[in-house]
Image (cartoon, helix red, strand yellow):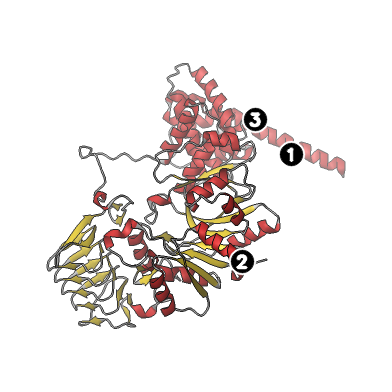
Amino acid sequence: MEDSQNLQAVMIADSFTEEFKSLNLSEPSCLMPVVNIPLISYTVEFLIFNHIKKLTIYAYEHYDKISSHIVSHKKENIEIVLVKCSDKPSVTSAFKDMDRMDQFKSDILLINSHNITNIDISEAIKAHEKRKKDDVPMIMTKIFFSVPLESRTRSKEDLLLIVEDCKTNQIMKYESIADKKTSNVNEFFEFKKKYHSELDIRMDLVDCDIDIVSPALVSILEEHSNYEQFRDDFINNVTESEIIVDKIFLYEIRGDKYFSRVNSYQGYFQTCMDVIQRKSFPLSPGEIIDSSSFIEYRSLIINQQGSCQFKGNNDKIGSFCVGDKTVVDFLATIKDSCIGPSSLIGEMSVITESILYGNNTIGQNCSISNCILAPGVSIQNDAVISDSLVINKDGENSYETIKLVYSNGKNLDGDDTDESDLIEDETDEDSDEVFEVTFEDEVKAIIKRQRDEDHQVDSVRVEVNSIKFSKHKSNSECVNAIFVGLINILMESGEEDIKKMIGTIHTNIANYAELIQNYLITENDQATLMESIEKCCIDHPSLNSGFHLLLQMCWKGKLLSDEQIIKWYETEVVNSHELRAKFLELSKGFVDHLKNQGEESDEEEEEESEESD
């Protein structure tokens, strides 16, 4: 089996984004410093960490600067080849160029220089190789990482809608929803489910831009050479094509790993904070790369490897990094921040959770918190700045602050809009109350929409799963949300005839039984369903006397086992609801029936055993 050492990595280095234009950077984004270390160095260390022995970098506009960096930071355990392009490179042009030079004979690892991650891709490579061994038509295995939608490191560009074949991990649909408010996939599912038995929508996955690519890709690129936007256009067209036989597969990285993409101010700020706090370990300053370019402080342990000057015995707090040729005054305080090279921090100034890009001057008695300071910005004495991007303005010692939006009152949350729009979120100033949409509310809305639009019940499972994964909900929580949501919708219909209502509930539990069964994996999940039945009968007085009927409906629908119902009946609950006694009395006859049925079954088994003896 081909291991990671036989894979060569390919990186397009000229992805120079306009996102950071306010920083007035003259270098390519792959050389952008994260905690005083260029992004590309983290990428190289990631490859070394995963035993990749060769990296080919395609560059055009910034070839000389990238070449200079590579020459001055040579690595013994990886070969780095820099290819100068005649035009701005793309994934398509790079692969075709490799094919022309007969260098695309085996699989290639396509990577992005904007990512910092410590994930281990060895299992992804094994899964890719197994498909090859099994002769599965395949051009690519894309690696994804599960990141909650509310994560601080997720940017707007990371929002994806992935439809996955659960059995094969084939990507059936790949859609960027960064600029979309809705995405309707019901028609897609009606078509695809004829050919694939089980599909799931995933919205919690972030595309790591780490792809294991087969040589078969080249022939498809030749036929479809107009796909310049590789991630969005080409991949989406391949996944939905009925003509292209070779498909794309998904591999999800699980476990306690770190992944972040630097493609926005939000991503840049949070990634720097995470690296300072060593969340990306072992890809952290001090353990790896460019150790001569920084001085690090952690838990008051000073590791002086550069030529910084410290006036006095600085009593620093937390974790932070200080760049080469930077002077920090005796009475200055730095907490969870990164100070770039050639900077000056004045007396009594306090810098908290901020990024100073380099060549910055902070005067005396300043307070800088949750900020990004562009290169060369100088702050005069007694200034107080927070939650801002600080950039140079025309004129000496003049600067401009652009207010940045924070999530959870603390973390940067800038999006990819124009800088002039990076102001506070639009809110209703007259509103004094904030209403939170719960998981149960969302599931109920999904069921109601499915019923109103007369879609298949299976579409509910797909949408519930997408929320389940993105919000890290358990099977028990899904059971409760679906059952309670369904009953509440039925009870809101206004039907006053309780017999008709019980009949309607019976029909709907039968219709939704298969959906609920998907989440009844353990005894605890069944116990949750019992609690949900009690809750519904308590919340709706008209159902107080119908508890035993709902119990029997769920039993007939194979949602509850005999043992689970008997266990519920015989378990004493301290400080239980006053209606529990009534529910127990109503259920006594049914429980006795289950017990008798079980005893008769045991007797029959004993008789059969005696006869066989």
Residue found at x 29% / y 83%: 307
Q: CA distance from mark 2 to mark 1?
A: 72 Å
Q: Residue furthest front?
A: 86
Q: Quadrant of residue 135?
A: bottom right
Residue picked out by circle 2: 102
Looking at the rendered structure, the kind of residue marked 1 is: Asp
Query: Residue lying furthest top in this view?
Result: 497
3D distance between C-alphas at marks 1 and 3? 14 Å
Task: Give the quadrant of the N terminus.
Answer: bottom right
Tag 1 residue: 602
Residue corresponding to mark 3: 593
In percent of the image, x 46 and y 79: which residue is there? Answer: 74
* Towards the viewer: 609 or 316: 316
Q: How many marks?
A: 3
Callout in the foreground (3, 2): 2
**438 w.r.t. 84: above or below:** above
Percent of width and height locating residue 461? 54, 38
Callout 3: helix, strand or loop?
helix
Residue 151 at x, y percent in the picture: 39, 53
Lateral position of residue 389 relative to residue 476, left or right: left
